[in-house]
Image: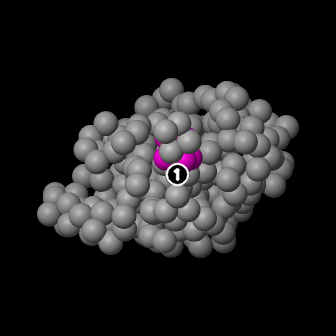
């Protein structure tokens, strides 16, 4: 079999693209904003992928998967995350995916089968959107947030589950002149404490994927402190789900050929 295979993960905040060849090598990857008003830029990028690569099969996943017109197949992000990470780490494991609007806990077999999964039920609490909104209210530069938090030994968390109330609570910290590095660490502690409420298998190796793992490295330190276990972060954790979709694209194409 020749050709290329596309995986598209259309998340609430960002859309991720991965193109694989028959040897599972990544030949193309990209991340763009999902709700970009410049539709021409997005359309041109997708057209360029299809013109540059002879795409055999496309799998779409994520919140917006039903809106990707070129998809041959749609799969849940839970399935694609499990498949993508298991391609890199073939062992039974727990996967925490912190996305823009939700948190998923997945128990995955070494082959990538989803054994069980759980999701947060408290709106966007503890997600990437939560971090962004609270950090903005606190006047924290997101690109410097991890470095700031690493300089703190702060132990408090935001008690409010609702993002709106958490914004008020962070203002009280500011009025109390809590140092900015403590604000940063306190936000991360709050997110990790939200994660800890998700039912998940805690005896298995623990992996974290998603945009928060990509851009907020220090949250791993807080997780390891909270859970008392090592946390494994794959390369390019934001792209793992798109990678899984591309793997599924290739396997589906192979199965279709075998059936002919």
Instruction: Left or right? Give the position of 95 relative to 62.
Output: right
Does residue 148 appear in the picture of this structure?
Answer: yes
Relative side of 215 to 137, left or right: right
Instruction: Report the side of 238 relative to 223 (left or right).
Output: left
Q: Which of the 4 quarters of the picture holds residue 83? A: top right
Instruction: Tell me which colouring the rendered structure shows.
Output: one colour
Kindly indicate the quadrant of the structure image that contains residue 158: top right
Residue lying farthest to the front in this orientation: 260
Q: From the top left corner, tell me how far across and down residue 237 is, in percent.
A: 58, 59
Identify the residue at horizontal 69%, vertical 49% (top origin).
86
**Is 20 drawn above or below residue 230 in the view shown?**
below
Query: Is residue 26 rendered to the left or right of residue 166?
Result: right
Residue identified by numbered label 1: 250
Determine which quarter of the picture holds residue 97.
top right
Foreground of the two, 9 or 26: 26
Query: SS class of the residue under badge 1?
Result: helix
Q: Position of residue 78 (x, y in %)?
A: 55, 37
What secondary structure predominates along the stretch shown in magenta? helix
Q: Position of residue 153 (x, y in %)?
A: 71, 62
Residue at 34% in and 45% down? 71
Residue 158 covered by magenta stretch? no
For the residue pair 156 and 192, the one nearer the viewer reads as 192
Q: Is residue 13 above or below residue 77?
A: below
Residue 129 visible (yes or no) = no
Q: Residue at x 38, y 59 (%)?
A: 55
> How many numbered badges does the structure rendering display?
1
Q: Which residues are magenta?
A: 251-256
Q: Name the residue located 73 percent from the left edge and 42 percent from the top edge.
A: 111
Verify whether residue 252 appears in magenta: yes
With respect to residue 73, does 219 lie above or below?
below
Q: Residues within 10 Å of mark 1 (few under 14, many from 20)?
A: many
């Amino acid at each position: 079999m020749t050709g290329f295979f596309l995986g598209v993960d259309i998340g609430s905040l960002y859309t991720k693209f991965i193109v694989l060849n028959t040897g599972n090598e990544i030949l193309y990857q990209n991340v763009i904003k999902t709700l970009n008003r410049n539709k021409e830029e997005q359309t041109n990028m997708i057209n360029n992928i299809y013109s540059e690569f002879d795409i055999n099969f496309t799998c779409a996943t994520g919140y917006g998967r039903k809106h990707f017109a070129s998809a041959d197949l749609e799969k849940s992000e839970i399935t694609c995350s499990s498949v993508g990470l298991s391609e890199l780490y073939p062992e039974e494991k727990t996967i925490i995916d912190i996305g823009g609007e939700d948190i998923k806990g997945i128990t995955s077999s070494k082959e990538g089968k989803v054994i069980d999964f759980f999701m947060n039920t408290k709106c966007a609490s503890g997600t990437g959107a939560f971090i962004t909104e609270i950090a903005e209210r606190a006047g924290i530069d997101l690109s410097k947030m991890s470095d700031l938090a690493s300089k703190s030994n702060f132990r408090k968390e935001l008690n409010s589950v609702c993002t709106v109330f958490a914004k008020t609570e962070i203002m009280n910290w500011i009025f109390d002149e809590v140092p900015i590095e403590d604000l940063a660490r306190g936000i991360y502690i709050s997110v990790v404490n939200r994660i800890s409420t998700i039912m998940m298998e805690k005896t298995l190796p623990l992996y974290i994927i998603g945009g928060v793992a990509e851009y907020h490295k220090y949250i791993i330190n807080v997780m390891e402190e909270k859970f008392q276990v090592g946390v494994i972060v794959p390369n390019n954790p934001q792209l793992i789900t798109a990678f899984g979709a591309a793997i599924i694209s290739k396997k589906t194409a192979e199965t279709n050929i075998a059936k002919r």
